Image (spheres, helix red, strand yellow):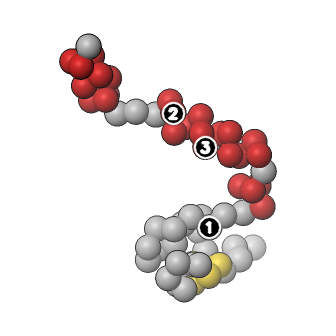
Amino acid sequence: MNAPVKVCKSCGTHFVDKYCNHCGQKAFEENDRHILALFGEMFHFITHFEGTFWTSLKRCY
């Protein structure tokens, strides 16, 4: 079974995977448009910091 070919909205490149091979833009799917997906992205953004962030924060206080 072949995966459907998608067209990148940013650069117009045809690709098959989840991300454009040319510019890296994510191809949003129907599941990405739900409110739970938004909360999941927010949780991911808030909780994933590099280790240097915590070191810098500790030095500020």
Q: Earlier in the sequence, mark 3 or mark 2?
A: 3
Quadrant position of the C terminus in the picture = top left
Q: Looking at the image, which residue is at 78% across and 51% down?
A: 34
Image marks 3 and 1: residues in contact by CB distance under 8 Å: no
Q: Residue furthest top?
A: 61
Q: Is residue 58 visible?
A: yes
Three-letter residue code for mark 3: Glu
Secondary structure beneath disc 1?
loop
Mark 3 nearby-residue class (10 Å; few <14, some 14–19, many ≥20): few
Which disc, if any, is residue 46?
2
Q: Nearer the viewer, residue 16 or 60?
A: 60
Q: Closer to us: mark 3 or mark 1?
A: 3
Q: Earlier in the sequence, mark 2 or mark 1?
A: 1
Mark 2 nearby-residue class (10 Å; few <14, some 14–19, many ≥20): few
Quadrant position of the N terminus in the picture = bottom right
x, y percent for residue 53:
31, 29
x, y percent for residue 45:
51, 39
Residue at label 3?
41
C-alpha distance separating marks 3 and 2: 9 Å
Q: Looking at the image, which residue is at 46% across and 68% down?
A: 24
C-alpha distance separating marks 3 and 1: 15 Å
- The mark tally for this picture is 3
Which disc, if any, is residue 27?
1
Q: Closer to us: mark 2 or mark 1?
A: 2
C-alpha distance separating marks 2 and 1: 22 Å
Secondary structure beneath disc 3?
helix
Q: Is residue 24 left or right of residue 16?
A: left
Q: Nearer the viewer, residue 47 or 2?
A: 47
